[in-house]
Image (cartoon, coloured by chain):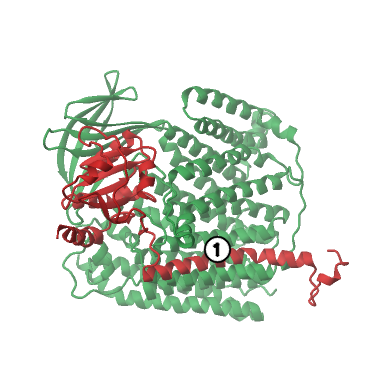
Chain colours: A green, B red
Amino acid sequence: MHGTVLLSLILSPELGRFALAFACCLAGAQTVLPLWGAWRGRTALMASARPLAWGQFAALLLSFCCLAAASVANDFSVRNIAENSAVAKPLLYKLTGIWGNHEGSILLWALILALCGVAVARFGRNLPGSLLARVLGVLGGTALGFELFCLLTSDPFDRLWPAPPDGQGMNPLLQDPGLAFHPPILYTGYVGFAVPFAFAVAALLEGRVDAAWGRWVRPWTVAAWSFLSCGIALGSWWSYYVLGWGGYWFWDPVENASLLPWLTGTALLHSAIVVEKREALKIWCVLLAIGTFSLSLSGTFLVRSGILNSVHSFANDPTRGVFILGLLALLIGGALLLFGLRVHLLQAGGLFAPFSREGGLVLNNILLCSICAVVLTGTMYPPFAALLLGQAISVGKPFFDSTAVPMAMPLLATMAIGPMLPWKRARLTPVLQRLWWASLLALLAWAVAAFGVSGTLPVLAAGFAVWVIAGAVADLASRILLFRAPLRDSAARARHLSRAVLGAAIAHAGVGVTVLGLVGMSQAQHAIVSVHPGDGVDLAGMRWTLRSVRDADGPNYHAHVATIDVTRNGRLIAELHPSRRVFPLQHQTTTEVAIRTDLVSDLYAVLGDEHEADGTVVLRLHRNPLAPWIWLGGLLMAIGGFLSLSDRRVRVGAPMRARRGAVPAVPAPAAE
Amino acid sequence: MSGGDTSARKPGGASPAQTRRRVLALLPFGVAAAAGGGFWAMLSRMRTGGFDPHDIHAPALNRTVPDFALPGLDAAHPGFSGNDLRHIDRPVLVNFFASWCIPCVAEAPLLGRVAALLPVWGVAYENKPSDAAGFVSQTGAPFARVALDGSGRTAIDWGVSGVPESFLVRPGGIIDWHLAGALTETVVSATLPALLSRIGR
């Protein structure tokens, strides 16, 4: 205990604020010096970019540690800690609670941005000197904006006097391991797109985009995209098992704000391949890179300024909104203006037939961007209708379900074919020859689904999901000549299969797995029952019996825990313990869902109200077929992304193992 | 680029096709600038109170409740009609909700505190009875009555723009106050008590 107090004295909030201000200065220098140097061709100024990026990161890390120390040492004289923490809060949540509030999350955001800058400085040593300087300069400018925002409008180190004896505690809904790590992963995804953005702006400043540019941008896009996929999947999983609604996606503005950059990021991921391999779609790719980061930033802005109505609302504050809007205007407006003025310098190139790999990727981009446009319209229509027409309209789940979801069908239909098309010009017959058994499987899936699944869209989606998964397998099979060459040859080919190809196939299969999960969830069965302890109900061919409800206490809550036995044909298959927690400090009640999964279906039970008068207990029982597949698919997508990232051919920007000894620690920037 | 069309050429020497392309390249900036201008207008009006995404002017304000009659959820939660609201002897808060609406879930604990001040009658907007029942049991929303508005017609008559939305109806069936959006701490602890004491006088 003394140790933590001593630590918090050294790492004082004042030191934290000072470190943050120092990081601002370094970020300012990181913006001005390298950009100036690249403009005037001064190598010394350009070379300052890398040490400045490291310095900025170190200062921010120190600042973050100071906030962590204040949180762990229960320093309630810091307003942010007093408002969001409490003595009784478990240590893990004292740490993760740092980013569970507006001020702390902005600091984390800036820290991750600085980390991206350091990663570019570390892995981008063989980038051309002026390009590296410009990329780091743009990243520095972005970081400067966020650090100023943190320092001027959302200071996490603000003191409170007199200090209260105990804090107010955090929202009990956030006291959950899944949510503890959801924000950093999601922010890494959002912020990661700053790197492709910086590359796009740097390319416009340079007036040049070539295949090498595509090769540098792609790994950063893949990395950001993988984190974002992971973050979205985690968030959706959290709402499934914490909110206790049996739902996994609510088309809430915050959820949409994460989906929009994911859609355009997926498009960017694919069009960057075309730039790299064929030097086509360059202008489009630059625009997508700017657009993706713009959507990441705007989503945060809209939610935190209070323009969009959401449950995830942080403290809404129009003053902060004005600051972020100014920041957005500078970053996004500046980048798009630069795009408008300088894009004609980029040479368009690379002709291709409509039916070719490039054509497939263009179609992918069109479909993804159309879905993105629909979701964007649905999300932004209410505030703009209120502003321009003076009428209030709410757009909810029904709109998105009937527009965005059907638009995903053609995307799934073409996903299996795309990776098999050769570049420049393709013919249909060889592709169909490789996909005949996948089509057979899809037809079979449709036939099975037509009997077992209700609803047109789920049936359609089930077949397409199987088609996508089979297509991914068929792609790999055809690459290793499975059953066409001797098995030994195939095995040798499989070992030498590039990880980028394997990663792409796994990510595609992940999409199929997620869609199967969505289809399964559309067939979920549920019942809400009011029972006495000892009573049972039948649902989905099983008998659910409430054994007892008992009291139990946790570190900062009181709980009621129910025991439910689930039996099939008299045989016990699961014992569920849903509970309700009352947090006296916050006057808040949370439900703890009991979920038993065997990966094929989830048994899901929620404890509702207990009626004192007649002794009955309300239970909400669900059987959710294939539910875990939704997040499993998301995880597969992220794994595919990381696997492809581990392929050295993809991350050409990374230092090569053999050459590492030969590269000096701070190489003189290559004279252009 | 056709060189014959010299009349359209600017002194700078850009052909019409090039000019068109440059204008097209500036289009994303234009769209972003328009959106930014819109956001700026929203923010500045939010500060003066002219724009509030949570507060929407209701056409039904200070009028008698419209005619309707809706079935109830179950025995514990009977339905109600416009006629019922015209014959209440104390103020009632009518709350439109839906099980698919997350802000409705979030506001449920506050409804519990409202119920200590005055009765709360719920209207399940475009919800199946089973989903509405799930909402009530799950959130413990303290509805004295729950009417099922499966088609959403009644909500249209009331001028509901989206769920959640709450209306304060005073004796005689007059809509006294209206909130488009979820209840907040301030509304429950300050706005509603003030309104109730005014009606009481």
The structure residue drawn at horizontal position 39% and vertical position 51%, both measured from the top left corner, is B161
Residue A47 picture location, percent across and down: 58, 76
Residue at 57% across, 33% down: A464
A347 to the left or right of A566: right
Q: Which of B113 and A491 is in front in this view?
A: B113
Location of residue A383 in the rendering, given as x and y in whole percent from the top left corner: 45, 59
Residue A555 shows in this picture:
no
Along the horizontal axis of the image, is B62 left or right of A268? left
Q: In this view, does B158 lie to the left or right of A85?
A: right
For label 1, count other residues whose C-alpha is less than 10 Å away and answer few (under 14), some (14-19) or many (20+): many
For mark 1, what is the residue?
A: A195
Q: What residue type is labelled 1?
A: Val
Q: Can you say which quadrant of the picture contains the N terminus of chain A?
A: bottom left
Residue at screen point 59% across, 77% down: A35
Determine whether A451 is above or below B140 in the image: above
Q: Quadrant of residue A288?
A: bottom right
A262 or A116, which is in the foreground?
A: A262
Instruction: Please indicate, yes or no, whether residue B175 appears anywhere in the rendered image.
Output: yes
Is the residue B41 above or below the residue B169 in the image? below
Toward the viewer: A271 or A220?
A271
Q: Position of residue A11 (x, y in %)?
A: 30, 73
